Amino acid sequence: MLTEGGKMMKKLNLTIIIGAIVISLGYVAITGLTNKAKEANFTIHIRAYDITIPEATIEGVQIKNVRQFNVINEPSNLIVRKGTKVNINIINESPISENFSIDGYEEVNWTLKSKETKSFSFIANKVGSYTIWCNLHPKNIHLPGTFSVIE
């Protein structure tokens, strides 16, 4: 028989496991999928991660002081239903100018200076999965995301 403290620990462990599963699936923003919403609101943070790996051995090769710089939109994956008005507020937290574009949606192509915020809206009128990317930098620097439109 579990004590009250044991039950609390079991519940806490289950919460941690579920949280780890959600994190491992990636950062995804889903809105309006259960109630056929006509409007979806997203806040996108463009964040830069600039780290130096002091030392590591990879497949027998030792490396030292390797700089890794990546930029990512958080959330990186957005899902809406067809016909939804999509309202996006973008906050560029990167130290340099960045761009937010969605392949297949020519009207979504915004460049923001460092620390700039922009808001815009469009209608998700094409079912499919589209790449979100920055057209200013190579895709290995600014990691792409996905905009998915479902029926």
Image: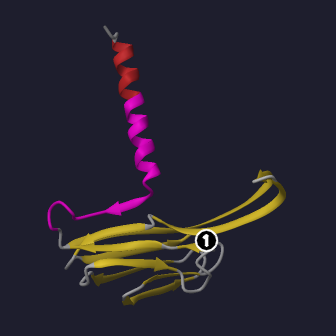
Label 1 CA crowd tier, 10 Å (few <14, some 14–19, many 20+):
many
Count all numbered tags in the image, as a single digit.
Answer: 1
Image side of residue 93 versus residue 19, left or right = right
Q: Residue furthest bottom?
A: 106
Q: Residue furthest left?
A: 35
Residue depicted at 53% across the width and 81% down the height: 134
Residue at the disc numbered 1: 94
Residue 143 percent location from the top left of the image: 55, 71
For the residue pair 8 and 130, the one nearer the viewer reads as 130
Residue depicted at 75% across the width and 54% down the height: 58
Which of the 4 image quadrants contains residue 69? Answer: bottom right
Colour theme: secondary structure
Image side of residue 25 versus residue 82, left or right = right
Q: Amino acid at mark 1?
A: Ser
Residue depicted at 32% across the width and 82% down the height: 121
Image side of residue 57 versus residue 40, left or right = right
For the residue pair 136 and 117, the one nearer the viewer reads as 136
Q: Residue furthest top?
A: 1
Which of the 4 image quadrants contains residue 150? Answer: bottom left
Q: Is 88 included in the stretch rendered in magenta?
A: no
- Position of the C terminus, as image quadrant, is bottom left
Q: Is residue 122 above or below residue 141?
A: below
Q: Is residue 9 above or below residue 68?
A: above
Query: Tag 1, which secondary structure?
Result: loop
Q: Is residue 131 above or below residue 107?
A: above
Residue depicted at 44% across the width and 64% down the height: 75
Q: Which residues are magenta?
A: 13-36
Residue 4 percent location from the top left of the image: 33, 13
Residue 132 percent location from the top left of the image: 45, 77
- Position of the N terminus, as image quadrant, is top left
Residue 108 percent location from the top left of the image: 40, 86
